[in-house]
Image (cartoon, grey):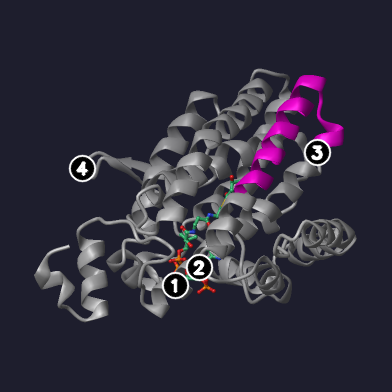
């Protein structure tokens, strides 16, 4: 680090490191607001991975074939692992697993609004894998270059598995669209219900975003909400058309001069309702997580007792 940088106040030196594309590591000095912003975003990302298992897990016992069941089991298992990577990354910022779970259970911490919608048919499993994991890929590929080292490295690992998630979902939709009229109608119904919530995954418009300006300055975020959403729409529309699905947006039109699709306005009132706990499944999702957490307490206690016996520090394994 140059002498000039060394003589700067901490904040300036920190920003100089960010501007120089250096990775910030757990033991480095960082502004408290940087730390808190990362705990907020990484923990919500982790919660999303874990809560997101519920709508898909709902179909493991009802998958239409042994192969589809095995694929779905593998995907849901991957999501649990993604949650663990991300909780571990959040813990490097000085917060315990217990505190993170407490924030989820009290509603102090959010998770992706999309997981508060019900998975009503097998086609929903396809739509979730295809649309939600496509959106996650667009977002997470960008986050591989986030300024916080542990988060960036977790993203590299997670992105490797997401493409399988997306492909298996799209394959379900393609198979249904090659089926009979009832199967094609089931796939279209799933797209109709999951399309707009998938656009909400990228957050409010850039001008309405509470965190984007600072997150972009600190290179926590590398691309804006609207920029990522546009990339997602451009690719998802082509994928829908390729298998004969109709995107449920009467304002969707290719804009030659922009080189992108123009699309309709998201229902932000619905978005606000869902992220404030009033979506179709919010209460069910949290109640399920609280119940599983409580039923799993004995495992955490046994691991802590085993660690204590071996003289290892008791690890929060909430
Ligand atoms: N669902 C719930 N809350 C959302 C949201 C959504 N789709 N979009 C935005 N919000 C919340 C933000 O958390 C913030 O609230 P807070 O201050 O209480 O945290 C508020 O709305 C304002 O939004 P901002 O755009 O200002 O917030 P961010 O700068 O954090 O941007 C984000 C939102 C783009 C989701 C960003 O947090 C992010 O990139 N997070 C990491 C990716 C992530 O969490 N993805 C969730 C899906 S994980 C998944 O799909 C797994 C897959 O494998 C199945």
Whether residue 60 appears in magenta in the rendering, the answer is yes
142 sits left or right of 40 in the view:
left
Q: Nearer the viewer, mark 2 or mark 3?
A: 2
Neighbor class of circle 2 (other Cα within 10 Å; few <14, some 14-19, many 20+) is: some
Mark 3 = which residue? 59
Q: Of marks 1 and 3, which one's residue comes earlier in the chain?
A: 1
Neighbor class of circle 4 (other Cα within 10 Å; few <14, some 14-19, many 20+) is: few
Rendered view: 281 above or below 36? above
Neighbor class of circle 1 (other Cα within 10 Å; few <14, some 14-19, many 20+) is: some
- What distance separates the C-alpha of mark 1 from that of mark 3? 38 Å
Asked if residue 13 can be seen in this view, the reply is yes
Q: Secondary structure at mark 2?
A: loop
- What distance separates the C-alpha of mark 4 from that of mark 2? 45 Å
Q: Position of residue 298 (x, y in %)?
A: 89, 60
Q: Nearer the viewer, mark 1 or mark 2?
A: 2
Mark 2 = which residue? 93
Q: Nearer the viewer, mark 1 or mark 3?
A: 1
Q: In this view, which residue lies farthest toward the bottom?
A: 9
65 sits left or right of 24 in the view:
right
Mark 1 = which residue? 35
- At 71% from the left edge and 60% from the top edge, which residue is drawn? 312
Mark 4 = which residue? 257
Q: Secondary structure at mark 4?
A: loop
Q: Look at the numbered discs 1 and 2 and tell me whether their residues touch, using CB distance below 8 Å.
A: yes
Q: Secondary structure at mark 3?
A: loop
Rendered view: 154 above or below 219? above
Q: Of marks 4 and 2, which one's residue comes earlier in the chain?
A: 2
In terms of depth relative to the viewer, which is nearer, 305 or 168? Answer: 305
């Amino acid at each position: 680090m140059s002498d000039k940088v060394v003589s700067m106040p901490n904040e300036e030196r920190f920003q100089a490191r960010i501007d120089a594309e250096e990775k910030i590591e757990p033991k480095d000095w960082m502004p408290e607001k940087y730390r808190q912003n990362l705990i907020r975003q990484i923990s919500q990302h982790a919660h999303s991975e874990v809560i997101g298992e519920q709508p898909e897990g709902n179909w493991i016992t009802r998958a239409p074939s042994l192969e589809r069941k095995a694929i779905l089991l593998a995907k849901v298992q991957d999501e649990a692992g993604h949650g663990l990577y991300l909780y571990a990354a959040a813990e490097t910022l000085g917060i315990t697993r217990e505190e993170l779970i407490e924030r989820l259970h009290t509603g102090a911490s959010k998770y992706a609004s999309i997981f508060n919608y019900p998975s009503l048919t097998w086609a929903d499993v396809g739509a979730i894998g295809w649309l939600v994991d496509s959106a996650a890929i667009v977002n997470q590929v960008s986050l591989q270059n986030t300024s916080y080292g542990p988060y960036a490295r977790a993203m590299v690992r997670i992105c490797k598995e997401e493409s399988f998630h997306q492909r298996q979902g799209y394959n379900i939709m393609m198979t249904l669209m090659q089926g009979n009229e009832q199967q094609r109608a089931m796939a279209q119904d799933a797209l109709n219900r999951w399309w707009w919530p998938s656009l909400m995954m990228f957050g409010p418009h850039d001008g309405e975003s509470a965190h984007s300006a600072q997150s972009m300055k600190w290179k926590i975020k590398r691309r804006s909400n609207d920029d990522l959403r546009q990339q997602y729409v451009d690719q998802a529309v082509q994928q829908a058309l390729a298998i004969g699905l109709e995107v449920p947006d009467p304002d969707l039109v290719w804009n030659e001069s922009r080189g992108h699709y123009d699309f309709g306005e998201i229902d932000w009132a619905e978005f606000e309702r869902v992220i404030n706990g009033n979506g179709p499944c919010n209460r069910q999702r949290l109640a399920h997580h609280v119940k599983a957490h409580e039923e799993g307490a004995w495992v955490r206690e046994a691991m802590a007792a085993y660690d204590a016996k071996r003289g290892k520090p008791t690890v929060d394994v909430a």
